[in-house]
Image (tube, rainbow, N blue to C red):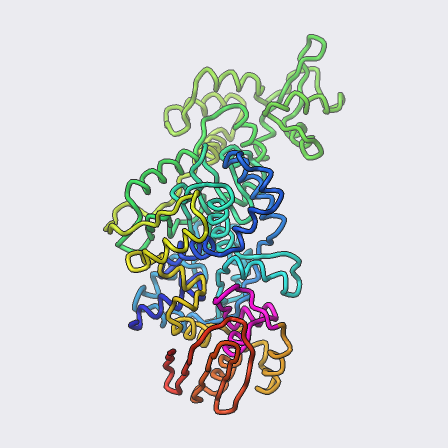
Amino acid sequence: MNSEQMEKYSSAVTLSDMEIFVFPELMYSLVLADIMSPVIWQWREDDCFKKLDGKGSMKKLMRLRQYIMDNYEFNLDLETWGLTTKQRETARFEKFLPADVIAQSNALFGYQGDKYYFDVDIRKHFGLDKYTTDVIPYWKTETVEAMNAFRHKQGYSTGAGECVSLSALYAAASFIICGVPLENIFMVLTPLHSQNFIDIDDGILTNNRRLLTKTMWFNGTAITAKAQRALRNENITIVAHPSGYIHCIDKDATINTDAYGHFTQRLESYLSTELTIQIFANFLRANSDFQRYFQLCRDCHGHPVFVKAEVLFHYEHSSKFLVGDKTHDKLLTEVSDEDFANYELPDRIRCDEFSDFIEKQKLDLKSEADRNTLTEFLKRKISAADELVEKLMEFCVTKAKLPTGDKNFRQTEPVRIGVEQTREEIISYLKSIRNTNAAADLAFYAYRDMESCDWTPFVKAAIERNPVSIEMTKNMSIDQVYHWLQGMPNESIYDGKRLAQPDEVANYGRGDGIEKAFVLANIIRQRNPMQDIEITVDAGKILLKDPREYNFLSNKGLQKHIQLSANGTYSSQ
């Protein structure tokens, strides 16, 4: 490999936020690595999924959501994978992207977002505000094995992962468990978030551990408002698909043009809705300042009685019924008689009359003329009618800031795997297209398949991008580090001939002998960069020489000789 290839392939091992931004094909490589993993395929044997055999994908997806919520936390500890520096990272990637371009679209390099993000101080929310110097977190993405291994980390009782890890997990599990074709799954990345658009029914958006149907997107709840932040307020930097990707900066794109056109239309449809009285009730739920302009009525022995909208919404907090939907009448029965007035409240619009108006007018909020018609109707009693209609338009229509189609679309070999295939058939197929599909080839590096991959990218990543193990042992002598490693369980978080990186060993407190040897090599190299280091992997016996000798035991059955030279080069034979 030349130096540029080495950066990309070693990045497939570490999968940091920055690396995926610079090498967008890595996003789908992680999905394919999770699909190749035995972990998710084992979920099929769980009773909760076996009971759904023969059921539709939507029902399975809703069960998958609960399974993920029960078994994984959203991890926002930015320092889980240690710290690096802006200077170091920009030096790594300056041959690919200029630093000022990266800063416009990457949260770790100064990205702030639009006015909304300034108002809510989004960098403080994500804990980025404390990184005011050159130091920044690595913010790495986890494979499903690394997500599961959080159970071994202090403070965690389940698996965990950050947003990119969870989106990759959802994509792989939707395919394996729910039978959703990969062609129907579009990965959507923004500078501060990662999610998926699943093209079934009216569309489903995955958001960390949750799923949002189109109905949920417009329900007006606080938790949904948080889930909407990325698509409402950020530019989409990458869309990834089995046919390829499109990137906000790259002039070239590999995603199939028909697939991308279909996705943009489907996403636009998902993000917009017609104005109905239920949608308007959801809008008032999300914009409580406007509730004071409305009242609702019900029949009481043949006479209308009236209740303030804000009072009725208050009753929602302790009820299973909601304003405006099919349970609306049941909610009204829970309202105390004292909260009803026997007369129409002044300076408030009756929601029944408003419902009749919008049903008769059939308003399209995308039309300026229809918005003006609505504004004139509301101005009879609402001084803030212009502001209300503007906010209502924003609520009903979200315009995603997608990468433009003005790209040089390069035709590439797509990934074609079907839901009817076995894991073994999929792995065999992906091996067969490694020479023609970059994402498939890189997937084996993300998968950590040391039997079929060049070891040098793994070694480079292990020695250059694993600061946690260095920080964790900074007060230990090398002999103490060796005894610390020997005291760990001699078990890898990866099955078969696959290897963990040093910081995975350090964070989870376990590792195979080969993995432990790389932890020790990483620490020795950091303390003495001019020291030659050799690691001999001979089936069950591992020998590290620096020139002192350290022995470890392995269950991986691998054979390799690795040389870390004082001049900073790595070789493996």
Whether residue 172 sits left or right of residue 437 in the image: it is right
In the picture, which quadrant includes the C terminus?
Answer: bottom left
Q: Residue at x 25, y 47 (%)?
A: 406
Q: Quadrant of residue 250?
A: bottom left
Residue sitting at the far top: 302
Measuring from the top left, give residue 563's x and y in whole percent.
40, 83
Q: Residue at x 47, y 79 (%)?
A: 537
Bounds of the magenta span? 490-519
**Looking at this view, is 142 or 318 the one in front?**
142
Measuring from the top left, give residue 103's x and y in whole percent.
39, 61
Measuring from the top left, give residue 139's x and y in whole percent.
49, 63
**Looking at this view, is 565 or 299 the one in front?**
565
Q: In the rendered image of this protein, does residue 377 appear above or below residue 104?
A: above
In the picture, which quadrant includes the N terminus?
Answer: bottom left
Q: Quadrant of residue 149?
A: bottom right
Q: In the rendered image of this protein, does residue 455 appear above or below residue 403?
A: below
Q: Residue at x 51, y 31 (%)?
A: 384
**Residue 16 seen:** no
**Residue 504 seen:** yes
Q: Quadrant of residue 221?
A: top right
Q: Residue at x 38, y 78 (%)?
A: 572
Magenta-colored stretch includes residue 50:
no
Q: In the rendered image of this protein, does residue 251 appear above or below residue 309?
A: below
Magenta-colored stretch includes residue 502:
yes
**Looking at this view, is 493 or 3 the one in front?**
493
Whether residue 205 sits left or right of residue 22 in the image: it is right
Measuring from the top left, give residue 21's x and y in whole percent.
38, 59
Q: How many numbered markers are drawn? A: 0
**Looking at this view, is 137 or 56 the one in front?**
56
